[in-house]
Image: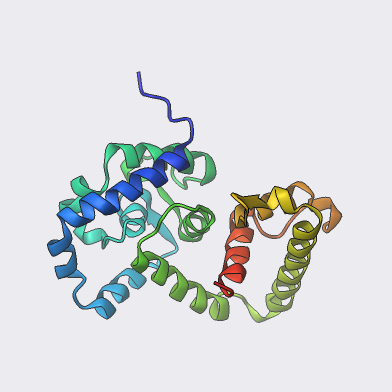
Amino acid sequence: MNKKIDNPLEVFGQTLDKFYETSYNQAKDRYEEYTNNSSLFVQRVVNYFKADTWLIDREAIPLLMGVIPTDWPSLRKDFYTEDVKKCIKSDYLTSLKVLNPEAKPSDWRIMKEDFIDWVEAKEFPKPRVFSGAIKEYLQKASTSHIKPRKAKKYSDDRELMFRAVVAVLVKFPEQCKTAGKVSAPKVAKVIDEKSLIWWPDGEIPFNQQTMARHIRDAISTLE
């Protein structure tokens, strides 16, 4: 019988902390060798962001770990431990939509943007190269993927969302914090729970993960 993981995200975060202290150190020379040309390495990562979908097992997870997918087969045993695997899957299977659930798990695909939103909404540590690639991707996407006729609506939706952010931080401050600090996912959750205040039909144009990403980006400007 598999051991139950009560809090997969907490265990995942702890496992990644340990992973960075051990596995990365064990493979330090090898890792530094193929990341030696940092600009080239980041560009190789960014190239994967051009695709609309990712294979979870062979593209999304390696990128999350800061590893080029083509290098994954030789590094997998060091980086993708059973604990990490269980913790990732126990959460993403309830949070992300698999596009081809009829396929074998190793061939499952997800939308790239769904995975990015999921990762950005979580508070576990992320390799600098993955965070950097996400930042570059989002900067490009913000100016290219929104069609002109939709730009104003998108802008209006974001403005209303941030009005909601200010409102819940003032009205429900304790529900928006973790250990005394504002938590983007918690702010997004409160907005979602009280969506009828700002959206008459209760339909928010952004999911919680996307809202959390926007909120976190705004908070980070003061850090």
Q: Check the image and name the residue furthest to the front.
A: 180
Q: Viewer-proximal residue, 130 or 99?
A: 130
Q: Residue at x 19, y 59 (%)?
A: 71
Q: Residue at x 61, y 53 (%)?
A: 185
Image-quadrant location for residue 134: bottom left
Q: State the image coordinates of residue 61 (x, y, percent, origin top left).
A: 34, 52
Q: Viewer-proximal residue, 123 or 47?
A: 123
Q: Viewer-proximal residue, 39 or 123?
A: 123
Q: State the image coordinates of residue 152 (x, y, percent, origin top left).
A: 73, 78
> Measured along the vertical axis of the image, is residue 199 above or below residue 134?
above
- Structure colour scheme: rainbow
- Say if residue 201 shows up in the picture: no
User: Quarter of the image containing the N terminus?
Assistant: top left
Q: State the image coordinates of residue 142 (x, y, percent, origin top left).
A: 56, 76
Say whether residue 44 is left or right of residue 147: left
> Measured along the vertical axis of the image, is residue 76 above or below residue 102?
below
Image-quadrant location for residue 165: bottom right
Badge count: 0
> Measured along the vertical axis of the image, is residue 213 above or below residue 79?
below
Say whether residue 107 is left or right of residue 196: left
- Say if residue 24 shows up in the picture: yes
Q: Residue at x 75, y 71 (%)?
A: 159
Q: Residue at x 85, y 54 (%)?
A: 197
User: Quarter of the image containing the C terminus?
Assistant: bottom right
Q: State the image coordinates of residue 120 (x, y, percent, origin top left).
A: 50, 59
Say whether residue 86 is left or right of residue 213: left
